[in-house]
Each structure stands twice: as C-alpha cells, then as structure tokens.
Image: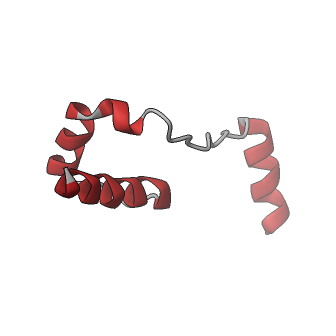
Amino acid sequence: MGEQDNVFEKVKIRLLSGIEINDSDFNFMKLNANLFKNIKFKKKRKAKKKWQMLKSRTKK
C-alpha cells in the first residue's frame, strides 16, 4: 500500500497545482476515486461578456 500512497500524493500535488495529469494517473484516479473525494477545488467564475468587453477597453 506504500506505493499507492506515493502515487496518490503525486497525483494530488499535480491536481492542486494545476499541472496536467497523464493517462496512467487518470486511470489511478478512476480506480481509487474514494481517495480523492475529500479534495476541494476552487471554482473559477467566468465574467459576463459585458464585463470582459469593459475590461478590454480600459486596458488600451
């Protein structure tokens, strides 16, 4: 089980730092989904088009 813990830590660090994971790590996540259930992700909100246009005009 020690190897599984190492893989879990590696994948967890990649997920939380925003690094793309490879296929083998993704398969590990699918097979061990219960290990990852307590990880909280910050949801990024998209601004409405009106505010994006306003922001781009103010930068010029």
Colour convention: secondary structure
Spot the residue most to the left. 24
Spot the residue most to the front. 1
Q: Give the image location of residue 39, x and y in percent.
A: 50, 41
Residue ID at (75%, 47%):
53
Residue ID at (27%, 39%):
29
Which quadrant of the figure contains the C terminus?
Answer: bottom right
Does the image show residue 5?
Answer: yes
Between residues 17 and 13, which one lies in front from this camera angle?
13
Residue ID at (35%, 58%):
9
Does the image show residue 20?
Answer: no
43 left or right, relative to 60: left
Residue ID at (16%, 48%):
23
Q: Give the image location of residue 25, x and y in percent.
A: 21, 50
Spot the residue most to the bottom. 60
50 left or right, relative to 6: right
Q: Is residue 48 above or below residue 5?
A: above
56 left or right, relative to 4: right
Between residues 5 and 49, which one lies in front from this camera angle?
5
Q: Is residue 32 above or below residue 2?
A: above
Q: Is residue 1 above or below residue 38?
A: below
The number of numbered discs placed on residues in the rendered structure image is 0
Quadrant in which residue 43 is drawn: top right
26 left or right, relative to 48: left
Q: Give the image location of residue 55, x and y in percent.
A: 79, 55
